[in-house]
Amino acid sequence: MNSDKPNYEIIKASKVNDKIIDHLINNLKLGLSEEFFISFESLLKLGKRAKLALETQFNHMDDDHNFRKEIFNFLLNYMDDDIANPPLEQLFHPDFIIRAKTIMQLGKEDSLKYLNFILPLISDPDDSVRYAAIKLIDSLNQLKNPYIYKKLKKRVEIESNLVIQKRIRKILELYSI
């Protein structure tokens, strides 16, 4: 595939078939990427048409994929209730600016409620989203949680942005045991 050509296109919802839905669902399993965010939004828009395929995938996931299971669960609940959850929808919006602004706008109470969805964004493809997520996690004093501490410790080793890497190191130093 030509790397200059995106692997997505605009398709009328009426033309979406099971193969396309399966492809969108599989993009959610690959981790955070542009394809992940576009697939997330597409599945939200497809709603109940994608529900059966999502349920099938969700039921076959093991417990090692908690973040993915929560994403699938959110999508399934959204399809059942048709109730919008703007912060969660915006945390995974294809536009990185919307993702970063959403993180910055969440209040402390909301942030804790969405922490399981914010934490994976420390691996977002965009630097500004990663920085916002790390800054928010630090402000919530959640590094006493060994799981969160471990995630940041792992992230600092692979972080390519030196400003973000320095911020993570500073945070980890404050909470080191």
Image (cartoon, rainbow, N blue to C red):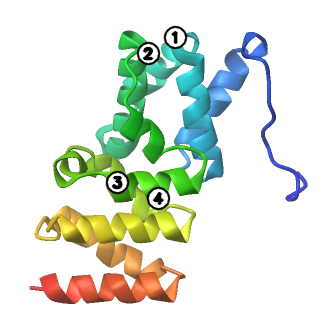
Query: Tag 3: residue type?
Result: Gln
Q: Earlier in the sequence, mark 4 or mark 1?
A: 1
Q: Residues within 10 Å of mark 3 (few under 14, many from 20)?
A: few
Query: Tag 1: residue type?
Result: Lys
Determine which residue is flagged by label 1: 48
Query: Which mark, by number, is residue 79?
Result: 2
Q: Cβ–Cβ below 8 Å for labels 2 and 1?
A: yes
Query: Which mark, by number, is residue 105?
Result: 3
Single out the mark in the foreground, 4 or 1: 4
In the rendering, at what x and y percent does residue 44 appear? Answer: 53, 25
Label 4, label 1: how many angstroms apart (C-alpha)? 28 Å
Label 3, label 1: how many angstroms apart (C-alpha)? 30 Å
Query: Tag 2: residue type?
Result: Met
Determine which residue is flagged by label 4: 100
Label 2, label 4: how many angstroms apart (C-alpha)? 25 Å
Q: Nearer the viewer, residue 128 or 120?
A: 128
Quadrant of the image occupied by residue 153:
bottom left
Q: Residues within 10 Å of mark 2 (few under 14, many from 20)?
A: many
Judged left or right of residue 131, residue 148 is: left
Q: Earlier in the sequence, mark 4 or mark 3?
A: 4
